[in-house]
């Protein structure tokens, strides 16, 4: 069953409404994320208007997930105790109806990560955000990823993304030069951003956290949440990229651009079908 | 017994002397702080002229507290092993006469944090720095805090702060739009800063670390230490806020402003009684 | 046996070739580093053109070391579980022929660190990068280090560095106002940089990570790797320092300068003998 595609204008209007909702509601976004990204992801969430909460301990994270607007789980610097916390927090989020977003960082790189992601996938993330190599590997394909960097173009991962979305009933967002979002029936490509984005560490992780902020204000429609978050990054990235003289100046200009982003500039996404 | 209030000019002169002492002595400030704030707090301490040491392991943190100028304990990303280290380090600091500062981040949010803060409070911090919701909850009141953000204005927390300071023999600093510092008999409000400060993650944590730097050079007068640290943030924040175009540019401009702060600009605090 | 010294021009040419190799090969640099430095070190590696991978868990780090271009081990925020991981990862790197670099942060400060570094040294790092106090203490001397800051000038540590290099068959890089690199027979002083570098936390840690990137593309000559990395920092630091107004603006300008660094500007190092 194919969903009726929305017109680009209708999709953009939904993104605009969601951005206004994030700014108005300041949703509490609980992140169990890696040490590299924590500060930057929190600053990105604050720039968007959301309220970050980096709460990860097994003693409190599952309970906190019941009051969070959304939970973000990112395995970038995974360890055994963190994995236990992630599993019980994802389970708690699921029971409480709190949407949660998975960032399967470099899960193809080691057996430890592959197994962790397999267990997390079984707990039904609402949205998965990864680079092309990560999504290809998640669908069982052979990826060209090296460490945390993608060795594949997004276009190579579209089929994998569709397959995962359809089989798992989840939204999959593949990010790269041109992003791709699918829920298995609807999909969209989103262009924009800047070549400096992959030169700033944790940009992808911060995007996953932002997807969480939008999921918190759009619980019924995780697809719209992912599209809105990616659109914000595409436009703010483009604006910051024009002014930046390198990755150092890009990072703070990007935070400024996110904070200044007005809803009616979100006219960006081009739905595919 | 009410302490004789100092004139604003006399208070400012003390702050000026303390800032010069931080710059001259480069006190060693040991931080057991959260993962989000570590880098930023260390950079703020360096900008102030202090020497940050992020030493947290149970194997060395208590011994290190004996040679530190001050210890800063912040429960932002608390976990069970870190809590054990915090408790034994606070105890060691107490025995050695090293002043220690508590930042009870979002302690009202979970039972795990509430219990941790109860145990830490029994180890007699010299100074407590929190937002209004945190301080209200610490006094047993009903706070409106959500996650790490305050849902209360500082003015609502002044009575709680006075009560904690008097009952515990500690200094309490409540920060927000207008800060409030009390030792139970003296108190002061400090205006300044910028609306962008709460948009940069870990600004409060970095302030707590800075309070530690001043406590290290003002062991006999933790009240003066807190006032001086908050005054520096108020002035540097104001200066950075004038130039910043968003939270990204604010963060680095704030570090520059702290590093450039000359002692005689500290004329800011307005003692209340 | 003294190695024939290279002319400054020949040494510079090697550095240029290595910088081009880092940019071309984007070597995977696995870092087991401290929480303060993770984000900054990753951004520095990305600015250089390398691919950072902060992989530390005992379950995967040793296996990952077999596919990494180089491993960087930094004890800045050491804890017992991390130490176990560092030891097994260094051992795995050694068996696989992956060069690894040691940053013995403040190892003189506690028994826990001293013992950790003693065990790590036995696993034969290819390169050691430290400040003067750290290197003096590593050679068994009495250092004036306080916390993570050096209390000694680099010149005071040159003899210690030569002794360690000769006894251990390793390269030692001592950084400060004028850096010093030795492999026991060759040595060089490298001037440049900026007085703001020690005011930005984790600059030394990020340099150690960069040494790792160069070691990955120069496995046969770790001495050349260290010289090239330090030369890049000296020049980019100098350029950023000219424009910066304080430590906040220095940090991002330094990342921009590293990213813009063209190979033929590496004419900096002045070999001593």
Image: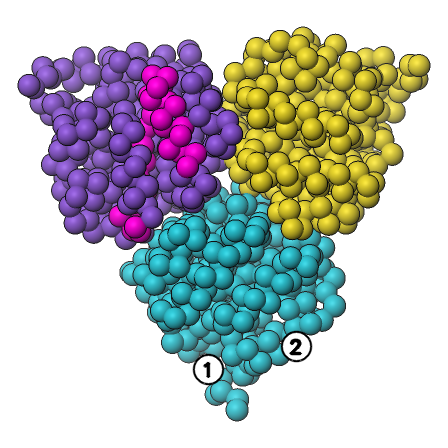
Chain colours: A yellow, B cyan, C purple
| Relative side of B213 to A44, left or right | left
- Please tell me whether mark 2 or mark 1 is closer to you in this view: 2
Image quarter where the C terminus of chain B lies is: bottom right
- Viewer-side residue, A59 vs C192: A59
What chain does badge 1 belong to? B
Q: Quadrant of residue A210?
A: top right
Q: Residue at x 11, y 23 (%)?
A: C185
Q: Which residue is mark 1?
A: B6
Neighbourhood count class around disc 1 (C-alpha, 10 Å): few under 14, some 14–19, many 20 upward: some
Q: Residue at x 18, y 12 (%)?
A: C10
What is the x, y in percent for residue A95?
82, 41
What chain does badge 2 belong to? B
Q: Secondary structure at mark 1?
A: loop
What is the x, y in percent for residue C88?
40, 30
| Relative side of B133 to C20, left or right | right
- Establish whether labels 2 and 1 are both on one chain: yes
Q: Residue at x 14, y 15 (%)?
A: C6
- Viewer-side residue, C60 vs C43: C60
Neighbourhood count class around disc 2 (C-alpha, 10 Å): few under 14, some 14–19, many 20 upward: some
State yes or no: residue C167 in magenta: no
What is the x, y in percent for residue C160?
14, 37
Q: Which residue is mark 2?
A: B159
- Viewer-side residue, A154 vs A172: A172
Q: Quadrant of residue A149?
A: top right
What is the x, y in percent for residue B160?
65, 74
Q: Which residues are magenta?
A: C84-111
């Amino acid at each position: 069953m194919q969903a009726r595609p929305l017109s680009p204008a209708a999709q953009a209007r939904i993104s605009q409404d969601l951005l206004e909702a994030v700014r108005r509601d300041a949703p509490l976004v609980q992140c169990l994320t890696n040490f590299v990204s924590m500060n930057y992801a929190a600053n990105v969430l604050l720039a968007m208007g959301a309220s970050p909460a980096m709460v990860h301990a097994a003693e409190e994270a599952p309970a906190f997930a019941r009051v969070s607007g959304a939970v973000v789980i990112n395995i970038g610097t995974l360890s055994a105790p963190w994995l236990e916390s992630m599993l019980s927090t994802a389970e708690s989020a699921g029971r409480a109806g709190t949407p949660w977003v998975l960032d399967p960082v470099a899960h193809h790189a080691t057996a430890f990560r592959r197994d962790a992601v397999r267990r997390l996938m079984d707990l039904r993330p609402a949205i998965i955000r990864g680079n092309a190599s990560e999504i290809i590997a998640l669908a069982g394909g052979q990826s060209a990823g090296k460490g945390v960097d993608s060795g594949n173009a997004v276009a190579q991962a579209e089929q994998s993304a569709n397959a995962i979305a359809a089989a798992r009933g989840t939204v999959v967002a593949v990010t790269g030069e041109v992003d791709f979002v699918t829920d298995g029936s609807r999909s969209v490509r989103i262009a924009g951003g800047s070549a400096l984005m992959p030169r700033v560490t944790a940009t992808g992780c911060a995007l996953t956290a932002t997807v969480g902020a939008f999921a918190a204000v759009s619980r019924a429609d995780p697809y719209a949440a992912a599209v809105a978050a990616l659109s914000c990054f595409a436009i703010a990235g483009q604006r910051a990229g024009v002014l930046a003289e390198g990755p150092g100046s890009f990072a703070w200009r990007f935070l400024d651009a996110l904070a200044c982003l007005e809803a009616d500039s979100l006219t960006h996404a081009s739905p595919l079908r």
